[in-house]
Image: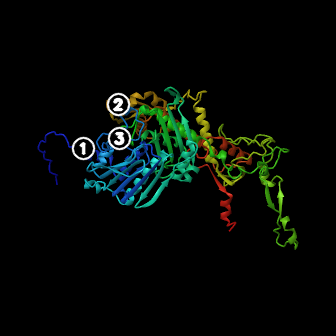
């Protein structure tokens, strides 16, 4: 059945809307749910210099939202202007708008909220003898009692727009959004205390951090809000751009700090990713993509990293007047910000955790009591063990044994080198092991270098190799217990990092001097496809970049592109799909980022085929050499595909398997 054609409504004259309707329209943009009101009011409290903010809620914020602070307060003669549209103390000119340094600045939030709820402001300014209460409905101003600061009450949200109220979720859901809004502010301001009350009960509280340094304050607040596990499974970030802006003193144009989670801490959802620009929580595709790209070859599958990153830059170089909720920003130089965030996170993740494995439990233990002195034989140190004496497992053992008084003789200190098969790993290497068939330049593992007399007491983080399991795993012993290493995954990462270093030759100042061109294979019959105007423009603008990637894409007609050559390693793939994906990347991100990603994917494939394969028997010396290389190789904790390369099994975990101590 055909739908009836729409009829044209009669012409309406153009007229000016009343102020109340204008405010209600603005409220539709600013106030989405109770959490939006909480965000705006907490922003104002922080701008007032508050050191303690208390949020009180009823029915998830629908019936009541009260935000109390101990800030500077509002003078009585200015209080009557608080609910007027576009009345603010944050900006006064276009220059102020272009360099906003406060959380709020639009001057329309209170007016919009007052148009859809019953509001009141109670404030006492610094230096005033008393406080005053402003009724948002009547505009009446009367004196009341209060200490210095401001309290804003919002009752019966959306009472004047019942249709909007129907879109709200349950009280529990709205409460969760309000808590999340305050939590984002708490992560940005560790110098401010926050408390959340719901239905008269304290449900969340983050006390003001009194640590001497800002770094310690931030670490404490991150632990309070995100949990101690986040601190234990994250790495500190502190990076700044090399170029500086001249503003009377040399200050970095961009500084990035915070903490990024290790790959093992990745989650299935992106619910613990926090980015702040000049103290403001933002959702920005540039920042999200930059952080995610730094995890590209250390995360497995579609796992999402966790991080809390803080960016400081000149307010004039970032536009916060993009969205009414001020949650989106626009950077003047997004390429610089993208590269800065990516480099900051990559540098933090580069240090291998394998280089510090096994050091926690032995931090207060003298090394000489863990490693005996073997300087006479110049061999690798072995752990001191208390070993049980030899036991007779014969079928008819002789009726002899130890007396009860000699029971201590069953356990004797054994500091002699291991015997039998285990001694292979501790003998002095006299010559290089013979090269096996099929080994390449990157394939063979060099023999480990035993510690000399000066390094005899040094503890290897990944310990010493004990054996090889099923030709796949290496078992090693360190101070904490047992280390299990996936030898193919570990060697794959080592080869991959070596190939990356060989490909990009770095100068003294860190600038890449040469970028290798991927070999291409011409297509006998060019693959043509219908292209959008954006794809045609990208292909023409990035012709040199596409050539570097081994692709030759040229216009076939005004609306058609032809793929005439593809990378040799991808010659069997879908040329059109490859071309579309590369053009989409180039149209969204920086060309150098796309080139680096494509090259890294090729190098990862080469490293996978060049690494030591499963079921290859390694000597103890080769195993130890692999462990030493892991300790010195960047990102050696994950293979190129994001899978872990090693795992620590502590003594307590092993004891629990055998119910020891129970």
| In the depicted structure, whether residue 434 falls above or below residue 61 | above
Can residue 523 be seen here? The reply is: no
User: In the displayed image of the protein, which residue is found farthest to the front?
Assistant: 129
Viewer-nearest residue: 216 or 585: 216
**Based on the displayed image, in which of its 4 quarters is residue 559 positioned?**
top left
Who's the residue at 29% across and 52% down the image?
Answer: 117
The residue beneath circle 3 is: 323
Query: SS class of the residue under badge 2?
Result: helix
| In the depicted structure, whether residue 334 falls above or below residue 212 | above
Viewport quadrant of the N terminus: bottom left
Residue mark closest to the camera, 3 vs 2: 2
The residue beneath circle 1 is: 22
The residue beneath circle 2 is: 94
Disc 1 residue crowd, few under 14, some 14–19, many 20+, Cα 10 Å: some
C-alpha separation, residue under disc 1 versus residue under disc 2? 23 Å
- On the rendered structure, is 520 left or right of 327? right
Who's the residue at 65% across and 60% down the image?
Answer: 653
- On the rendered structure, is 599 left or right of 180? right
| In the depicted structure, whether residue 38 falls above or below residue 449 | below
Can residue 537 be seen here? The reply is: yes
Which is nearer the N-term, disc 3 or disc 2?
Answer: 2
| In the depicted structure, whether residue 369 falls above or below residue 322 | below
């Amino acid at each position: 059945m055909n739908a009836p054609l729409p009829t044209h409504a009669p012409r309406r004259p153009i007229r000016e809307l009343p102020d109340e309707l204008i405010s209600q329209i603005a409220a539709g943009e600013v106030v989405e749910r109770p959490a939006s009101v909480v965000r705006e009011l907490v922003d104002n409290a922080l701008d007032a210099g508050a050191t303690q903010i208390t949020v009180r809620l009823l029915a998830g914020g629908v019936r009541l939202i009260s935000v109390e602070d101990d800030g500077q307060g509002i003078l009585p003669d200015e209080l009557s202007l608080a609910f007027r549209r576009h009345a603010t103390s944050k900006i006064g000119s276009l220059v102020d708008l272009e360099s906003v340094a406060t959380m709020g600045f639009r001057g329309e939030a209170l007016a919009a909220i007052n148009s859809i709820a019953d509001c009141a402001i109670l404030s006492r300014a610094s230096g005033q003898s008393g406080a005053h209460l402003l009724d948002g409905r009547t505009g009446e101003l009367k004196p009341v009692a209060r200490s210095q600061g401001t309290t804003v009450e919002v009752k019966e949200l959306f009472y004047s727009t019942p249709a909007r109220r129907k879109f709200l979720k349950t009280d529990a859901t709205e409460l969760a959004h309000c808590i999340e809004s305050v939590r984002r502010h708490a992560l940005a301001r560790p110098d401010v205390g926050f408390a959340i009350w719901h239905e008269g009960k304290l449900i969340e509280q983050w006390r003001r951090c009194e640590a001497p340094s800002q770094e310690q304050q931030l670490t404490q607040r991150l632990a309070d809000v995100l949990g101690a596990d986040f601190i234990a499974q994250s790495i500190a970030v502190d990076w700044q751009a090399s170029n500086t802006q001249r503003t009377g003193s040399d200050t970095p144009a961009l500084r990035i700090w915070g903490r990024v989670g290790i790959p093992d801490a990745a989650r299935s959802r992106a619910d613990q990713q926090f980015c702040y620009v000049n103290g403001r929580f933002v959702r920005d595709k540039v920042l999200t993509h930059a952080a995610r790209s730094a995890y590209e070859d250390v995360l497995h599958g579609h796992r999402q990293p966790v991080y809390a990153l803080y960016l400081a830059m000149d307010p004039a170089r970032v536009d916060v007047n993009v969205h009414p909720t001020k949650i989106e920003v626009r950077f003047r130089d997004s390429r610089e910000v993208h590269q800065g965030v990516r480099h900051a996170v990559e540098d933090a993740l580069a240090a291998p955790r394998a280089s510090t494995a096994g050091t926690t439990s032995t931090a207060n233990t003298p090394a000489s009591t863990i490693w005996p002195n073997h300087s006479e034989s110049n061999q690798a140190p072995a752990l001191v063990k208390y070993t049980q004496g030899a036991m007779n497992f014969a079928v008819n053992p002789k009726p002899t044994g130890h007396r009860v008084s000699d029971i201590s003789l069953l356990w004797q200190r054994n500091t002699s080198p291991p015997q039998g098969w285990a001694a292979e790993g501790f003998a002095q290497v006299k010559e290089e092991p013979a090269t096996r068939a099929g080994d390449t330049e990157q394939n063979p593992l060099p023999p480990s270098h035993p510690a000399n007399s000066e390094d005899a007491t040094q503890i290897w983080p990944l310990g010493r190799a004990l054996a090889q399991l099923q030709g796949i795993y290496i078992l090693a012993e360190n101070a904490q217990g047992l280390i299990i290493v996936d030898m193919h995954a570990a060697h794959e990462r080592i080869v991959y990092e070596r190939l990356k270093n060989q490909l990009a030759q770095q100068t003294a100042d860190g600038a890449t001097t040469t970028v290798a061109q991927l070999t291409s294979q011409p297509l006998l019959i060019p693959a043509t496809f219908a292209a959008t105007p954006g794809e045609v423009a990208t292909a023409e603008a990035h012709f040199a970049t596409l050539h570097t990637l081994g692709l030759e894409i040229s216009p076939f007609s005004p609306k058609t592109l032809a793929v005439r050559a593809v990378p040799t390693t991808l010659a069997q793939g879908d040329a059109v799909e490859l071309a579309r994906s590369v053009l989409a990347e180039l149209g969204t991100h920086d060309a150098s980022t796309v080139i680096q990603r494509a090259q890294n994917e090729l190098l990862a494939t080469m490293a996978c085929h060049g690494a030591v394969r499963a079921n290859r028997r390694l000597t103890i010396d080769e195993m130890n050499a692999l462990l030493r290389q892991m300790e010195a190789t960047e990102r050696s904790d994950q293979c190129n595909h994001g899978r872990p390369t090693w795992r620590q099994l502590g003594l307590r975990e092993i004891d629990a398997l055998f119910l020891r101590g129970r």
